[in-house]
Amino acid sequence: MESEEFSEHEVATVPIEKEGSVLRFFLDLLETIALSVVLFLGINALTARVMVDGFSMRPTLENGEYVLVNKMSYRSELPEYGDVVVFHFPVDPAQDFIKRIIALPGDDINIIDGQVRVNGHVLNESYIAAAPQYVGNWHVPEEQVFVLGDNRNNSSDSHSWGAVPLENLIGKAIFAYWPPPEWKVLEHVRIYQ
């Protein structure tokens, strides 16, 4: 077998197939775009990203924070007491709200003397901004949940417009991801046993 040697002035050239490399580039580009679309659709099928608009969930969430929502959380299980949820507002389903679940289907709620009672038990609510300054009694119909904002005295919630149908739930809020200094996993506290 002969070996070829090149002087310092000679250069070995390999023919480049321009048509093949252009075709390969476009195939790679098409593959990248297809993968991006599949990932985008998959992520959107499993999660939602919402911006907190207002102060009704203070101190847990602040105005302008962005929250990641698990849209699959209630496909196979029911909501739990204390879950922070995003839902379509029953009065205007074009709007999405974020609140905390206080009571489940069939529960009775009584708010008096700054305390929230569910089925006669006072809730453990260390996460609220201040005790509610309103009073009332509610019964949660079947297939619905009762939600309140953590900023009880500055929140449009079930105490003013009623319970939320389970079908309106988008999912469970799990993580505040923007702005970065405010990153946090949302605590879904046990408020009722």
Image (cartoon, helix red, strand yellow):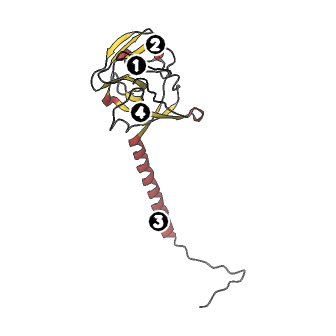
**3D distance between C-alphas at marks 1 and 4:** 17 Å
Q: Earlier in the sequence, mark 2 or mark 3?
A: 3
**3D distance between C-alphas at marks 2 and 1:** 12 Å
Q: Identify the residue position indicated by label 1 in the image.
A: 157
Q: Identify the residue position indicated by label 2 in the image.
A: 132
Q: Earlier in the sequence, mark 3 or mark 1?
A: 3
**3D distance between C-alphas at marks 3 and 4:** 45 Å
**3D distance between C-alphas at marks 3 and 1:** 57 Å
Q: How many callouts does the rendering have?
A: 4
Q: Earlier in the sequence, mark 1 or mark 4?
A: 1
Tell me if mark 2 has few (under 14), some (14-19) or many (20+) residues whose alpha carbon lies within 10 angstroms of its own: some
Q: Residue at 50% across / 21% down in the picture? A: 126
Q: Quadrant of residue 190?
A: top left
- Name the front one of labels 1 and 4: 4
User: What amino acid is found at the position of numbered circle 1 in the picture?
Assistant: Asp
Q: Secondary structure at mark 3?
A: helix
Q: Quadrant of residue 69?
A: top left
